[in-house]
Each structure stands twice: as C-alpha cells, then as structure tokens.
Amino acid sequence: MEKTIYCSSYRTLIGRLRSARIERGLRQAQVAKMLKVSRQWLSRVEICQIRIDVLQLSSWCQVLGLNARDLVRELEEGR
C-alpha cells in the first residue's frame, strides 16, 4: 500500500480543501489562524508534504463551511 500522501484520493481531498479556501477568498494565513496552526504547516498540507488526520479534516471543514462526511463520500464514490 502506498503512503497516503502519494495516493490520488488524498491529493483530491486536499485539492478540494484548497479550492474551497480560495473560492471563499481566504488566504492560508487566515485559515491557519482559525485552525490554530502555522501558515507553514497549512502550506505543507496543501502541497501534500504532510498528511492530516480525521480530526484535523473535521476542523478544516468546519472553518470552510464544508461537510466532512459529504467530502469523504464523494471520494468514496470517485467524484
């Protein structure tokens, strides 16, 4: 099994989070502040250098107004 940061599904998930951030007109620094993480950490996640866990995903979705269950369901369905 390949590492999840190299998995196309993980890259799709992170891409959706990044796209949602941009669509909402938010900068990395703003989202990082809301998540109480560094901008550098957020940047590394967005370029798939490090991975997030389910709790981080949930928090990130809350900040962006996304539904984590829907996001995961879309990945499972291959959308």
Image (cartoon, helix red, strand yellow):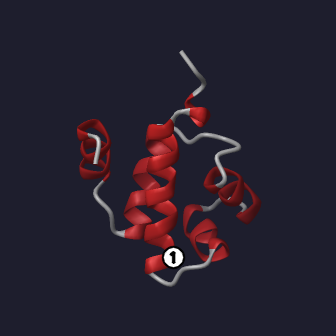
- Residue 28, percent from left and from top: 64, 71
- Residue 72, percent from left and from top: 31, 43
The residue sitting at 64% across, 46% down in the picture is 48
Identify which residue, 53 or 3, lies in the foreground. 3
Q: What residue type is labelled 1?
A: Ile
Q: Is residue 25 above or below residue 75?
A: below
Q: In this view, does 22 lie above or below 71?
A: below
- In the orientation shown, which residue stands out farthest toward the right? 40
- Give the residue number, with chain letter if any, for mark 1: 22
**What is the number of callouts on the image?**
1
Q: Quadrant of residue 24?
A: bottom left
The residue sitting at 63% across, 70% down in the picture is 33
- Residue 64, percent from left and from top: 41, 69
Identify which residue, 37 or 7, lies in the foreground. 7
Q: What element carries label 1?
A: helix
Q: Quadrant of residue 27?
A: bottom right
- Residue 38, percent from left and from top: 72, 61
33 left or right, relative to 55: right
Dot 1 surroundings within 10 Å: few (below 14), some, or many (20 or more)?
few
The residue sitting at 49% across, 38% down in the picture is 8
Q: In this view, does 26 lie above or below 72?
A: below
- In the orientation shown, which residue stands out farthest toward the bottom? 25
